[in-house]
Image (tube, grey):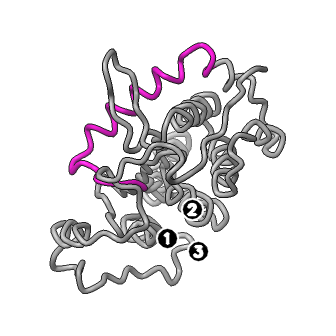
């Protein structure tokens, strides 16, 4: 065999070995949050729990989908009626527009986190200040809202929410790889680490999944569903439709540029 052919064979074998033994990138874990902007439990989850995956790096193995629609329902002519009144519909639109305007999850989450922090302080009428706090230009968000595109996005989120199997019964409704966590949603990080099939990141250390007696591993999804029937109070439920002042005071919004 001449030297030229030897070199070709050598590089072919080297390329094959590099390909065969190169690390395969693992699939990200799907994490979906179905929520509504003025539900205090949703705001608390976003600002105190969900934010952790950005702080500890777990977001690197997560495909996060935020769905700001919640317990809203469709009325006549595809009008949307929100659980906490018209201001919630407006703020749902704003956050939907933020997700559309800034596809980068870090950017739109920062903006939404800022708004939900204001909700917790009953200052959500100051939502435009989040543009300055996050360093994001909200012009595209305002254009989206004022053009009515936010309503179209909300109708898409309505269809996505209504298609859930099993159907959601309250918010926040957290789903990991198409499986709802029901009342165990605050332990979502453990479910993410359990579902990830690659080398677990450092954030997964100490995140061994422990299941309560009501939701032991032998019961599986049925156990989780059974646990949901004795749901805690940390949720905004379908059967507790409250409009406006009974939960959160309503403020007027201003959307001018």
Quadrant position of residue 216:
bottom left
160 to the left or right of 63: left
- Taking depth in this image into account, of 181 and 69 the one nearest to the observer is 69
**Cα separation between marks 3 and 1:** 7 Å
- Taking depth in this image into account, of 213 and 170 the one nearest to the observer is 170
In the rendered image, the quadrant that contains the C terminus is: top right
- Taking depth in this image into account, of 228 and 185 the one nearest to the observer is 228
Q: Secondary structure at mark 2?
A: helix
Considering only order in the chain, which callout, 1 or 2, is on the residue closer to the N terminus? 2
Q: Secondary structure at mark 3?
A: helix
* 170 drawn magenta: yes
Magenta-tinted stretch: 144-172
Q: Which residue is mark 1?
A: 200
Q: Which residue is mark 2?
A: 44
Q: Position of residue 1 (x, y in %)?
A: 45, 45
185 to the left or right of 50: left
Q: Position of residue 40 (x, y in %)?
A: 53, 57
Q: Mark 1 packing: few (<14 Cα in 10 Å), some, or many (20+)?
A: some
């Amino acid at each position: 065999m001449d030297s030229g052919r030897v070199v070709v064979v050598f590089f072919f074998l080297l390329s094959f070995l590099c390909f065969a033994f190169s690390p395969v990138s693992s699939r990200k874990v799907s994490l979906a949050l179905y929520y509504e902007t003025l539900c205090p439990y949703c705001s608390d989850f976003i600002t105190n729990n969900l934010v952790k995956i950005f702080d500890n790096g777990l977001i690197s193995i997560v495909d996060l989908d935020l769905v700001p629609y919640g317990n809203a329902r469709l009325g006549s002519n595809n009008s949307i009626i929100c659980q906490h009144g018209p201001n919630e519909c407006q703020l749902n639109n704003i956050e939907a527009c933020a997700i559309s305007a800034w596809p980068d999850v870090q950017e739109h989450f920062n903006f939404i986190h800022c708004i939900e922090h204001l909700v917790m302080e009953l200052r959500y009428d100051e939502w435009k200040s989040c543009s300055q706090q996050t360093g994001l230009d909200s012009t595209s968000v305002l254009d989206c809202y004022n053009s009515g595109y936010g309503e179209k996005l909300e109708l898409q989120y309505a269809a996505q929410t209504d298609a859930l199997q099993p159907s959601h019964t309250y918010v926040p409704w957290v789903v990991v790889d198409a499986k709802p966590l029901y009342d165990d949603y605050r332990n979502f990080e453990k479910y993410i680490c359990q579902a990830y099939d690659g080398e677990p990141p450092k954030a997964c250390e100490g995140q061994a999944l422990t299941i309560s007696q009501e939701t032991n591993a032998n019961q599986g999804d049925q156990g989780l569903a059974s646990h949901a029937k004795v749901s805690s109070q940390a949720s905004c439920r379908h059967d507790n439709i409250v409009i406006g002042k009974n939960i959160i005071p309503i403020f007027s919004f201003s959307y001018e540029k």
